[in-house]
Amino acid sequence: MVKLLVIIYDNEKKLKMLFRKYKLTFNAMTYGSGTASKSVLMYFGLDEIRKSIYFSLIPSRISDTLFHELETKLKIVELGKGIAFTIELNSSNKFISDALVKGDIEMEKFDSGYELVVTIVKEGYSDLVMSAAKKEGCGGGTVISGRSLGSSRTVFMNLSIEPEKDIVLNIVKSDIAKNVMKEITKEAGIKTEARGLIISLPISRVLGLQEESKVENTNNVK
């Protein structure tokens, strides 16, 4: 089984060493920015506004060992260091399967209790998405600048869609995911000025999230 590994972390040198060690070649990197207020940025591993976001395809057989190194060597579990999570993929093309899945064994599936809510909106509407998400208990997130294919606006379901996009990533607890999506749809959905498209993906494993109450307690220590 192939998993998508997503890491929000700023030490590129350490990550490259880790990727080389496990011979991970299907990798990509982009930059994102934190959307949370400063009081809760650390809750989502975003102690700074700008963050590096890494994507890698990994075979499930190395998941346990890889997460152990992310926890013990990269210290992602420490408050403010970053976030790492995986999403199980249902299928991949033959080239990837031959490279990653060959000889793999069926691993026990994890249920982290979290989901990744992905919202794609017109550029400049990410704050509206976060405002809606916060109403349902979401503490923060990350924004990636993107662009739809094509050089000009397109029409979908009689609605004009602009090419410049903000991609908002929110990790939320599974029990509030539907409410978060409903509120985002209400405030920034496809029928609003934001023209938002919203999906959610189950997270099989996650490192780096801290309970918001712990952050508040830490901030209150004098």
Image: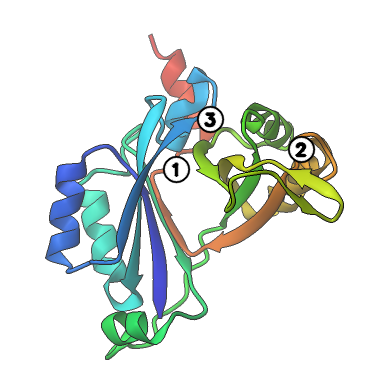
Q: Which of 68 and 183 is in front in this view?
A: 183
Element marked by disc 3:
helix
Comparing labels 1 and 3, the label whose residue is closer to the camera: 1
Q: Which of marks 3 and 2 is nearer the N terminus?
A: 2
* Placement of 164 over or under 28, stated as above or below: above
Q: Which residue lies furthest to the top in this view?
A: 222
Q: Kindly identify which numbered label has been placed on residue 188.
A: 2
Left or right position of 10 against 202: left
Q: Which amino acid does label 3 sit on?
A: Ser
Label 1 and label 2: CA atoms lie apart by: 26 Å
Comparing labels 1 and 2, the label whose residue is closer to the camera: 2
For residue 199, which quarter of the picture? bottom right
> At x 50% / y 19%, what residue is drawn?
39
Could you say where residue 205 lies in the image, as x and y percent from the top left? Answer: 44, 60
Q: Earlier in the sequence, mark 1 or mark 2?
A: 2
Element marked by disc 2:
helix
Label 3 and label 2: CA atoms lie apart by: 28 Å
Instruction: Read off the residue under disc 1.
Output: 209
